[in-house]
Amino acid sequence: MARQTPILERRFFPEGHTIIEEGDVADHAYIIQSGSVKIFKNKGGKPVDLATLSVGDIFGETALLFDEPRTASVKAIEDCNLIIITRQVMEDKLKDCDATIRAIVKMMKERIKAANVDRVEKTATDVRDIHKLFSDAFKLVMGFLDPADRKNYQNEASPIMRQFLDLTQTYLERLSKKR
């Protein structure tokens, strides 16, 4: 006898509503039926935007795979109708799958977790982070250049990078004085 497909719950969230709060207990994901959301994470007390999602996208999917608190917050940036998928529904569907599919999902779980951690760690949140990004990019390019080109690149790129970082710092200081 064929297994019955459960009717999935739907919820409405108005624009500006926080749908998921980082650190909350997680046991379900959402499919966006209408509207759009912003996903962000707090790093050093500042929000770091991770993604903007809209119709057809899924968020909170790590709750289907991991029994851990929410790793990011989600806010409706316009009115949203969302379909809820629980971890139990996901587990029931996986039980019906071939062992190969279950193995692939297990492997993807680990990759998703590693990618999420890596992305947040590499996201710049202040001028010091931007300086590190520029420095890392500079070193990467230097590593690809022939020894004869390295000195020329360093002589040409260093002043431009310094000017950009100094100008950015100046504008950020002006902005902080206005607040």
Image (cartoon, rainbow, N blue to C red):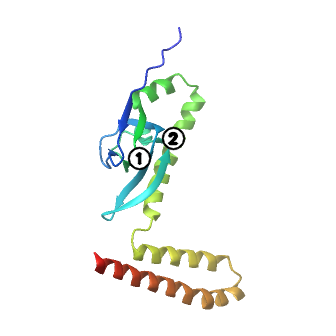
Is there a contact, CB below 8 Å, between mark 2 and mark 1? no
Q: Which residue is mark 2?
A: 55
> Among all residues in the image, which is located at the extreme top?
1
Against 87, is 143 above or below? Answer: below
Q: CA distance from mark 2 to mark 1?
A: 11 Å
Packing grade of label 1 (10 A; few <14, some 14-19, many >=20) is some
Location of residue 69 (image quadrant): top left
Count the marks: 2
Asked whether, in this view, residue 96 is left or right of residue 6, the answer is: right
Q: Amino acid at mark 2?
A: Val
103 and 173: which one is in front? 173
Residue at x 42% of width, y 35% of height: 82
x then y, percent, for residue 130: 46, 74
* Secondary structure found at label 1: loop
138 and 49: which one is in front? 49
Closer to the camera: disc 2 or disc 1?
1
Packing grade of label 2 (10 A; few <14, some 14-19, many >=20) is some
- Label placed on residue 90: none
Residue at x 40% of width, y 81% of height: 171
Q: Which residue is mark 1?
A: 78
x then y, percent, for residue 85: 42, 31
x then y, percent, for residue 179: 28, 75
x then y, percent, for residue 137: 56, 75
43 and 150: which one is in front? 43
Residue at x 50% of width, y 53% of height: 115
